[in-house]
Each structure stands twice: as structure tokens, then as C-alpha cells.
Image (cartoon, rainbow, N blue to C red):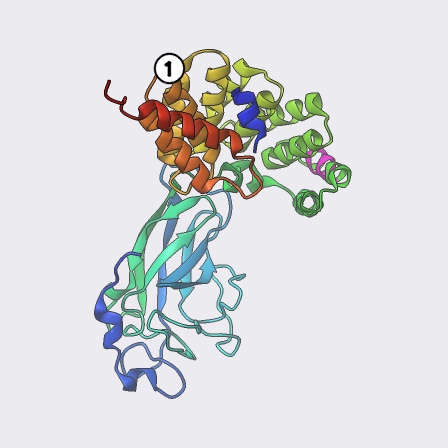
């Protein structure tokens, strides 16, 4: 089965400390205190930074995590600094980290990990925060966590140091934002937001109009150029789409999404060398992050008849894709193992694909390949 056809088919165990909360602590009238006789708010301050040292692309949310639940308590400034007051005014998490509002709006509230409701008035209790953690939250990244159980009674202003953000292994490049977005004027941002609504409704021409406005207003807007490429490609304007994707890379060479967009576009056009080049460029940006990049590289190398490189890329795609978001990589790896005569490994990959294939996938050909692999790996009957 040609891989061009393949292309188209288709928490931690927490300590028992939380359970030691006393009935008296939960039942305090007027909300939880800071652990003493007064009801002073608890403040935490610190900084959020990207591990590679690049500037933050936007203000970052600061969350308190009390497994299994979490709630945003505020946001950093554009330099990553934060100073949040736990439990106050965080009903939607829209405020900056430097702001606090009346406790009457909302406390931390909700269900903590022990399943009981706490109605704070002017701050979280140190006791209530046992088993809870402070972390940063930015799509596409994982954050250091500060154990709030380390806070002591009487500590009403704790500096937690720097919380570093790292790209998620197997992350989605579409969820990583470009640093150029920091300078986007409000009208350009509004145009991109409107365009994304149109794209969700498959109104591609309207999306194109809004995105053209965005890049005319702010020519360095890498995310807008990439979105424009997607809208144009959806309108079968592939040549224009390619120019938009390349413009996105020219604006921000570290923004991953246009590399993936170009690899996908080149694969649909059977431009295998370019698909290999663009997917390799994304892998170079972060070798451990994107199984999609390795998958497109494997497809391209297969069609370039470099089966060793195809096998290597397919293996890496499957290794990184622990959530099975790219099941076609497992199907392709099965094909490559079969070509090598390793029918046991091929059968395993075919089974994995069948277990994770989307509901509308045509799986008959893979079932036939699995049956063939199982037959070929069976011991020969004695003569």
C-alpha cells in the first residue's frame, strides 16, 4: 500500500496530608484563615521563564493545583513577574497577577482533592493548601511546580522563585505561540480572533479577509501569516498558501507551526523532498517535541525510497506519540517492518493502529496486512 494512500486515509500519588484536615478547620465561619487567629490573605510572588531563555510570548496564567482540580489565581506581567493573592477574585482567571479584587466576587472555592467545599473569604489556609501546588500554565508547555505545603504559618508573602516552562513532549505546535505576537496591535489581534471563528465554521473566504487585515496592520505577525496560509490552502490556493507559510517563518524562525503546515502541504502535493526538508527543520527546532514532524519525515523518506531514514523517523514518531494522536505512524511503521521481513514487529504496529484508528478510518487494508504478517510469522508446519 503506497504511503501516499496512507497519508490520505485517514498523578502523582498524593500524600495523605490532605486527609488530615480537621473538622474544625473546614467549618471555620467566614472562610479559611491563614493558619493563625487572623484572616490575612496569603500572597505568593515569583517569576515565570522559558527554559531556553527566549522571552515569554504572552502573559502566563498562575494556577493552584489541588489534585484533581486546579484554578487560575492570576497572571504574570509581560516580563514573567507575578504577585498573586490566593483565593481572591479568581472566578474566571482574567485578572493580571498584580491585581486582586473584592473577596465577595469569588474565593478559590470549588472542590479540593478531598471532595469538600471551602468558601474562603480573604485567603486560603496553609492547612487547606497541604497537597496543593503552584504552577504556571501556558498552552504547549509544562511547568515547574512549587509545593504550597512548604509554606509556614505566619508566612503571608512567600517568594517561590522562578517557575520554568518547557515544551511538552509530543506537544502540539498549533498550541505554541510566536514571540512576535507580543507586538501585535489590538486591531490585528481582533482580526485573528475573528478569523479563527470563521475557520471553525469553515468560512474560509471570510477568514482570509480578516487575516489579510491582520498582516497588513502588522506585517511581522507570524501566527496570522500561518493562519492565512491555512485559510488559503483550504480554498485550494496552494501557491499563495506556501508564500504565507514562508512569510510566517521569515517573521519568526522559532515558531513551529508553519514548518508543520509546509510539510503537510508538500506531502499532499507529493513534493517529497520539500516535505522531508520542512519536517526535518521542525525536528531540529526541538528533537523531542513533535511526533507529527517525524511522521511527515517518514512519509517523505519512504516516497524518496530512503527506507532506513523512513524507518528511523517512523520509530521516533511512534516513540514520542504516547497519546496515539498520530496512529498513521504506527501503520507506516508496520509497512516498513514488513519490508524488512520483521513480521512480528509489523503485526504489533498494525494492531496498535487498529486499536487507535479514528472511527471513520478504512481499516480493511490494515486488517489484511495484519493477517498476512501473522501468517508469515507463524512457525512452519513439520514436514
Task: Name the quadrant of the C terminus.
Answer: top left
- The extreme bottom residue here reads 29
**Relative side of 131 to 245, left or right:** left
Query: Can the viewer see residue 249?
Result: no
- From the viewer's side, name the closer residue of 54 and 127: 127
**Relative side of 339 to 127, left or right:** right
Q: What residue sits 61% from the left and 23% below the top?
A: 268
Q: Position of residue 87 (x, y in %)?
A: 42, 71
- From the viewer's side, name the closer residue of 138 and 309: 309
- From the viewer's side, name the closer residue of 259 and 323: 323
**Relative side of 235 to 93, left or right:** right
Q: Position of residue 96 (x, y in %)?
A: 50, 59
Query: Can the viewer see residue 214?
Result: yes
Secondary structure type for disc 1: helix
Q: Position of residue 133 (x, y in %)?
A: 32, 61
Q: Which residue is mark 1?
A: 308
| Magenta stretch bounds | 210-216
How many C-alpha atoms fall within 10 Å of the one at disc 1: few (<14), some, or many (≥20)? few
- From the viewer's side, name the closer residue of 158 and 315: 315
Residue 257 drawn in magenta: no
Q: Position of residue 263 (x, y in %)?
A: 54, 24
Q: What residue sits 73% from the left and 34% below the top?
A: 212
User: Which quadrant of the structure image shows residue 309?
Assistant: top left
Q: Is residue 144 above or below residue 7?
A: below
Q: Is residue 270 above or below residue 74?
A: above
Amino acid at each position: 500500500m503506497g504511503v501516499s494512500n496512507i497519508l490520505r486515509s485517514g498523578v502523582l500519588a498524593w500524600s495523605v496530608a490532605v486527609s488530615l484536615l480537621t473538622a474544625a478547620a473546614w467549618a471555620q465561619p467566614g472562610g479559611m484563615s491563614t493558619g493563625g487567629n487572623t484572616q490575612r490573605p496569603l500572597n505568593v510572588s515569583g517569576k515565570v521563564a522559558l527554559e531556553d531563555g527566549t522571552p515569554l510570548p504572552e502573559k502566563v496564567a498562575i494556577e493552584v493545583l489541588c489534585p484533581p482540580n486546579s484554578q487560575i489565581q492570576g497572571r504574570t506581567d509581560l516580563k514573567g513577574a507575578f504577585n498573586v493573592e490566593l483565593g481572591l477574585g479568581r472566578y474566571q482567571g482574567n485578572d493580571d497577577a498584580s491585581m486582586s479584587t473584592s473577596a465577595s466576587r469569588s474565593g478559590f472555592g470549588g472542590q479540593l482533592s478531598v471532595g469538600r467545599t471551602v468558601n474562603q473569604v480573604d485567603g486560603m489556609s496553609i492547612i487547606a493548601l497541604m497537597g496543593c501546588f503552584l504552577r504556571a500554565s501556558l498552552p504547549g508547555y509544562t511547568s515547574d511546580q512549587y509545593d504550597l505545603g512548604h509554606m509556614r504559618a505566619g508566612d503571608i508573602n512567600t517568594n517561590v522563585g522562578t517557575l520554568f516552562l518547557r515544551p511538552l513532549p509530543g506537544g502540539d505546535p498549533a498550541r505554541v505561540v510566536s514571540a512576535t505576537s507580543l507586538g501585535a496591535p489590538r486591531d490585528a489581534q481582533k482580526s485573528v480572533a475573528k478569523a479563527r471563528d470563521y475557520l471553525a465554521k469553515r468560512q474560509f473566504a471570510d477568514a482570509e479577509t480578516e487575516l489579510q487585515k491582520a498582516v497588513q496592520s502588522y506585517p511581522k505577525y507570524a501566527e496570522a501569516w500561518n493562519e492565512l496560509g491555512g485559510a488559503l490552502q483550504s480554498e485550494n490556493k496552494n501557491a499563495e498558501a506556501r508564500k504565507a507559510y514562508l512569510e510566517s517563518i521569515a517573521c519568526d524562525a522559532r515558531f513551529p507551526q508553519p514548518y508543520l503546515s509546509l510539510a503537510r502541504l508538500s506531502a499532499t502535493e507529493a513534493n517529497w523532498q520539500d516535505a522531508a526538508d520542512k519536517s526535518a527543520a521542525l525536528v531540529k527546532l526541538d528533537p523531542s517535541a513533535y511526533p507529527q514532524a517525524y511522521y511527515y519525515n517518514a512519509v517523505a523518506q519512504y516516497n524518496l525510497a530512503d527506507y532506513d531514514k523512513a524507518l528511523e523517523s517512523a520509530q521516533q514518531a511512534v516513540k514520542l506519540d504516547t497519546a496515539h494522536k498520530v496512529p498513521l505512524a504506527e501503520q507506516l511503521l508496520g509497512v516498513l517492518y514488513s519490508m524488512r521481513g520483521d513480521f512480528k514487529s509489523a503485526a504489533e504496529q498494525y494492531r496498535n493502529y487498529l486499536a487507535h484508528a479514528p472511527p471513520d478510518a478504512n481499516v480493511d487494508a490494515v486488517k489484511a496486512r495484519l493477517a498476512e504478517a501473522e501468517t508469515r510469522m507463524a512457525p512452519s508446519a513439520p514436514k
